[in-house]
Amino acid sequence: MLFHDIKFIPVNSMIDNRTCIQILHRQKVPIHIIRHCAVVARVGCKLADNLRSKGEVIDIDIVRAGGLLHDIAKMQAIENGGDHAEIGARFLESLGYYRVAEIVRQHVFLKEPVKPASSLSEELVVNYADKRVMHTKVVSLDERFQDLFKRYGENRLAIEKIEELYKQVRIMEQLIFSRMAIKPEDIQYP
């Protein structure tokens, strides 16, 4: 996937695809992370589009931008330490992109625990989309979390955090798909 492959996502917001890609380039985000972000954006937009067709109020442009920029600080955090979601959010706030920054801030863990009766939000959609994309492949939650346990489950505390996250994402999945006519396995790439 190259940068011009991202054109599939609608552009009608204050932070369009070109701006997102320029920001990613300026931050020297590696191509493999950009590719991952593009797939997350695509999955998020597919979910948002389906939810909107069922009457849900979801801003697809904000989902797109949040998906494209959610890992903007991933490499920086790997190299220097820190929480990549918070670092990325603060950077985007410094550019004036407050709404997208909040999605980036919550793409790993949502601010509030998800309950079966929770409202849908752009943060929830991007968070879930990210959990369905392993590198550039759309996978089941089970496959994605097996990978997360292998990569990040180095101690009991980390394992417990991942287990809790898994429970939350399962609730997100039920919440999202209870409002659509498609099933989780219908989300494929491309």
Image: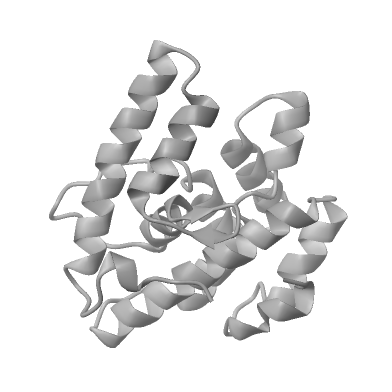
Residue at (47, 35) in percent of width and height: 148
Residue at (69, 75) in percent of width and height: 17
Q: Is residue 130 above or below residue 77?
A: below
Front-lying residue, 124 or 35? 35
* Quarter of the image with the C terminus in it: bottom right
Residue at (38, 72) in percent of width and height: 47
Q: Position of residue 39 (x, y in %)?
A: 57, 66
Using residue 103 as the reference point, say whether residue 112 is left or right of it: left
How many numbered discs? Answer: 0
Quadrant location of residue 16?
bottom right
Front-lying residue, 120 or 32? 32
Q: Position of residue 143 (x, y in %)?
A: 40, 46
Front-lying residue, 76 or 33? 33
Q: Is residue 5 above or below residue 96?
A: below
Residue at (45, 12) in percent of width and height: 155
* Quarter of the image with the N terminus in it: bottom right
Using residue 52 as the reference point, say whether residue 152 is left or right of it: right
Colouring scheme applied when the structure was drawn: one colour
Quadrant location of residue 53?
bottom left
Give the residue at the far top of this rendering.
156
Q: Is residue 23 above or below residue 161?
A: below
Q: Position of residue 60 (x, y in %)?
A: 47, 76
Using residue 30 as the reference point, say whether residue 107 is left or right of it: left
Give the residue at the far left of this rendering.
117
Q: Is residue 152 above or below residue 130?
A: above
Residue 95 visible in the displayed image: no
Q: Position of residue 115 (x, y in %)?
A: 17, 47
Residue 1 visible in the displayed image: yes
